[in-house]
Image (cartoon, rainbow, N blue to C red):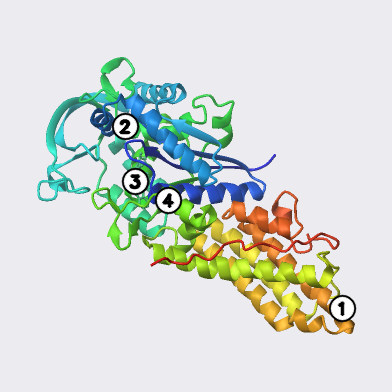
Amino acid sequence: MKPTFYVTTPIYYVNDVPHIGHAYTTVAADVLARYKRLMGFDVYFLTGSDEHGQKVEKAAITAGETPLELADRVVKRFQALWERLGISNNDFIRTTQERHKKGVSRIFSDILDRGDIYLGEYEDWYCTPCETFWTETQLIDGRCPDCNRPVEKLKEESYFFRMSKYQEQLLAHIEANPDFIQPKSKRNEIISFVKEGLRDLSVSRTTFSWGIPVPGNDRHIIYVWFDALTNYITALGYPDESGNFGRYWPVDIQLIGKDILRFHAVYWPTFLMAAGLPLPKKVFAHGWWTVEGQKMSKSLQNVVEPNMLIDRYGVDVVRYFLLREVPFGLDGDFSHSALVNRLNSDLANDIGNLLSRSTAMAVKYFDGILPDPDVLAEIDLALKNKTEEMVTAVDKFIDELAFSKALQAIWDVISAGNKYIDDTAPWTLTKDPAQKNRLATVMYCMLESQRIVHCILSPFLPTTAGKALASLGWHEEITKDALTWGGLKAGRTIVKAEALFPRFEEKE
Ligand code: MSP
């Protein structure tokens, strides 16, 4: 049986349209999913939409729609974008689906029955846009500490989750599992937060109606984060153990942005503890993108729309840029000039030129039929070793979610390939018939190294990889074995590759 691998993205709010922030997490998760499939894992990759709560209710009122009409309309934009971006999710969960509502009611009732959810009364400062209650001391100048908007005093009957009870158990878990929360800096933040003390958490609302009612008391709507977080198991068919839930839970990696770490590293694990379910193996919080140095926001009208980027630069260029430009886990800045730089230098120049010049030579010197290599000389072995070492390094980097380092390691081999051609100078070898075998070896090595490069790049650049590999005469399925030197056999037809990535010339 194949080992399983379950990866999730946050489920996105439908009161906003997709932007590069959403695309970022989803592309990263897609690369992981594709890479693990390639390595032989039985992968389940989940994404979806968060459709309940007051924010969505308010947005619907503003738009003159019902919340469900709004959700139906906006969710299509997410789904269409994921398709364009080549996202290979196995499932898409919407929190308005029956399967989800059933699962949420079930886990809520379970925790209620176990006594860790109780009815009480609540009074505190509430920030509607953030759907968060704050204590007096948390407010900054009387406003929401997260978004700086005004808050209102709310008193309501509410169900509470006994989160305080799980403080020590959660700390012990975080300490015993150094990889549970990553990156490390974020892990430390969560440890200090938990050490300050966990309060019981209000998990129901009576102030609006768009959501899942509390089982047995439908004056109360289940708190939107309780509802949303549960998607990671309801999509697997929780509580039915006989299908995907039994097979894929606990999840291997939950990718999220740093702003929602507390929900995923404190609330969610304690809910699971209370329900007697295993905890996620790893939660990784990535950084935020600013745009040309500024916070991305509707009011600044600088929201970067992924569809526009794909139209202008191409899908693989966008995927590449997002994961190459900024180390995963740190904040980064988006700018068109940075993207164009990456496109023209890394993609058009380095990898694109390497493929077109080498396939052109194979066509010219060997009529496009891949020759058998002779015994490898030192310079050939160096390229072979570098390629093989890269495969090992990439595996380690992907495990650490260090996508930019993985790409860097691949690009080192691409640079080595370009240098290899300059150093071996096939155009000189071809002039001397006595060097025919030497020329054959050089052809083989430069093409085989690139075949491995494009195979291992396929999770990052799925569209390009297909084209590149076809021109290298490789039409097989890409598996782990494809990453071994020697896969390309003599006799294969090499076709001169078109420019993989046309240069982008900035118009004035
Ligand atoms: N619905 C909740 C998540 C529930 S998960 C059980 C939510 N949705 S969201 O649509 O507002 O945001 C989803 C993700 O987008 C978050 O991980 C957030 O970090 C990410 N981003 C939003 N803006 C971003 C940037 N500017 N840069 C990078 N990621 C950003 O939160």
Q: Quadrant of residue 273?
A: top left
The reply to whether dot 1 and dot 3 touch (C-beta < 8 Å) is no
**C-alpha gap between disc 4 and disc 1:** 49 Å
Q: Is mark 3 within 8 Å of ligand 1?
A: yes
First along the sequence among labels 1 and 3: 3
Horizontal and vertical percent position of residue 302: 30, 54
First along the sequence among labels 4 and 1: 4
Dividing the image into 4 quarters, which one contains the C terminus?
A: bottom left
**Crowding at mark 2 (Cα within 10 Å: few <14, some 14-19, many 20+):** many
Q: Nearer the viewer, residue 70 or 169?
A: 70
Q: State the SS at label 4.
A: helix
- Residue underneath mark 1: 436
Q: Quadrant of residue 434?
A: bottom right
**C-alpha gap between disc 1 and disc 3:** 61 Å
- Residue underneath mark 4: 308
Q: Quadrant of residue 122?
A: top left
